[in-house]
Image (tube, grey):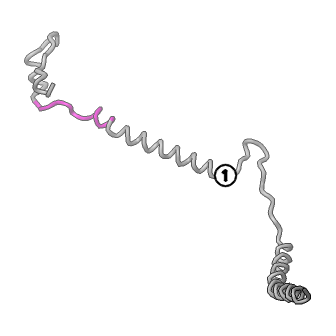
Amino acid sequence: SSGRLLGSRESRLERWSVEAPVLAMALTLSRRALGKVVELPQFTKSRFARRWNMVDEDRVKWYNWNLACIALTAVPCLWMYTVNYRTSEETAILIRTLNPTGTEKIKYDLKLYGS
């Protein structure tokens, strides 16, 4: 039984000899940390005085993306509005010749258009 006690004392001494430098290092690091000052965050004074954060940045990206999509959608619409949709230069002359008063409705053969 005395050998067993002796063995446990020796193991405790060995463990202490290994742990002592680690504890000493932790103590020195904690002393260094005591000298540091943690800055307090700046809280908002009112709902109008806000800090810039990720939500605001995401909102700006979202607005810019929406503006880009609107602009890209407007390009084909504006082109279709300004393009000459007549099939040939003679279309106006033919319509004026066939229907000079504009009272008749010109009927087109829908089979020509794949219908």
Which contiguous range is marked in magenta? 77-89
Residue linked to disc 1: 52
Q: Nearer the viewer, residue 86 or 15?
A: 15
Residue 91 in the image, given as x and y percentages of width and height? 12, 26
Magenta region includes residue 79: yes
Up-down: is 102 above or below 90? Answer: above
Give the class, few, some or many, for how many residues have Cα within 10 Å of label 1's Cα (few <14, many ≥20): few
Relative height, residue 49 to residue 84 (above, below): below
Q: Residue furthest top?
A: 103
x and y percentages locating residue 9 in the rendered image: 88, 86
Quarter of the figure with the N terminus? bottom right
**Location of residue 66 in the rendering, given as x and y in whole percent from the top left corner:** 47, 42
| In this picture, residue 101 sits left or right of residue 13 | left
Q: What's the residue type where badge 1 is placed?
A: Trp
How many discs mark residues in the rendered view?
A: 1
Q: Give the position of the C terminus as an image quadrant.
A: top left
Name the residue rendered at 11%, 31% in the picture: 89
Left/right of residue 67 with respect to residue 8 in the rendered view? left
Residue depicted at 86% across the width and 77% down the height: 31
Comparing 39 with 24, the one in front is 24
The quadrant holding residue 18 is bottom right
Residue 65 colored in magenta in the image: no
- Which sits in the foreground, 80 or 36? 36
Q: Of helix, strand and loop, which one carries label 1?
A: loop
**Residue furthest right as drawn:** 2
Vertical relation: 33 (above or below) 5: above
Q: Position of residue 25 (x, y in %)?
A: 81, 82
Q: Residue at x 32, y 38 (%)?
A: 76
